[in-house]
Image (cartoon, grey):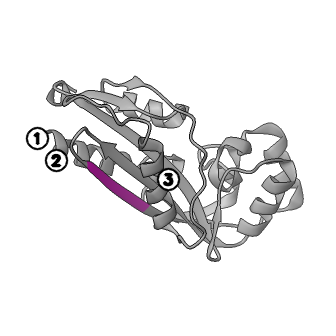
Amino acid sequence: MKRFSNYNIILASNSPRRQQFLKDIGLDFSIKTHPVEEIFPSALKAAAISDYLVKLKAEPYKSLNERDLVITADTIVWHNDQCLGKPKDRAEAVRMLEQLSGEAHQVITSVAFTQAHQQKVIHEVSRVYFKALTSDEIDYYIDHYQPFDKAGAYGIQEWIGTVGIEKIEGSYANIVGLPVAQVLATLEKICS
């Protein structure tokens, strides 16, 4: 977008969904990632976890020039006072989906906007209601889709979102992995 052309926007994410969202809003950006071990203090709860993780992901970008703006993002699923991240294996994916079945949970995405002189962190919370899933539906989804790179072991934009989610409250884009309207509003404030 022309109004952000004074900034060198860097997306620090390999997520194809986040990259596509930024392309969809016409943002010029580059992609630069650094591996970060996503470990957080056990005392943190809900949005405090994802807020902590986006700051952690921004730490490798210490030497920025005045025109650089690094965007880091992290999405978690929060259910029954527990953080559900990306499943490590099939058994964990099954457990997560069984846990979410017939229940409501929160999807929380935090986004950090890091510059040489300041950092702004925002987060968005959406609520997702799953119908009771059968074991056949859970097995089908895990066998045919990609639950292993997604918090809570599911992607709302995939088959399970169509057949398994009864309703959502809040931002759909946030559940996919980036609260696009809020990101755009924050960029407009930072870059004005």
52 or 155: which is nearer to us? 52
- How far apart marks 1 and 3 lie (CA) works out to 27 Å
Q: Residues within 10 Å of mark 2 (few under 14, many from 20)?
A: few
The span picked out in magenta is 119-124
Are discs 1 and 2 less than 8 Å apart at CB?
Answer: yes
Left or right? Give the position of 153 relative to 54. right
Disc 2 is placed on an element classified as helix
The C terminus sits in image quarter: top left
Disc 1 is placed on an element classified as loop
Type of amino acid under label 1: Ser
Q: Which mark is residue 192?
A: 1
Residue wearing tag 3:
53
Earlier along the polypeptide chain: callout 2 or callout 3? 3
Residue wearing tag 2:
189
Vertical relation: 121 (above or below) 45: above
Vertical relation: 63 (above or below) 77: above
How far across and how far down the image is residue 180, in percent? 36, 45
- How far apart marks 2 and 3 lie (CA) works out to 23 Å
Disc 3 is placed on an element classified as helix
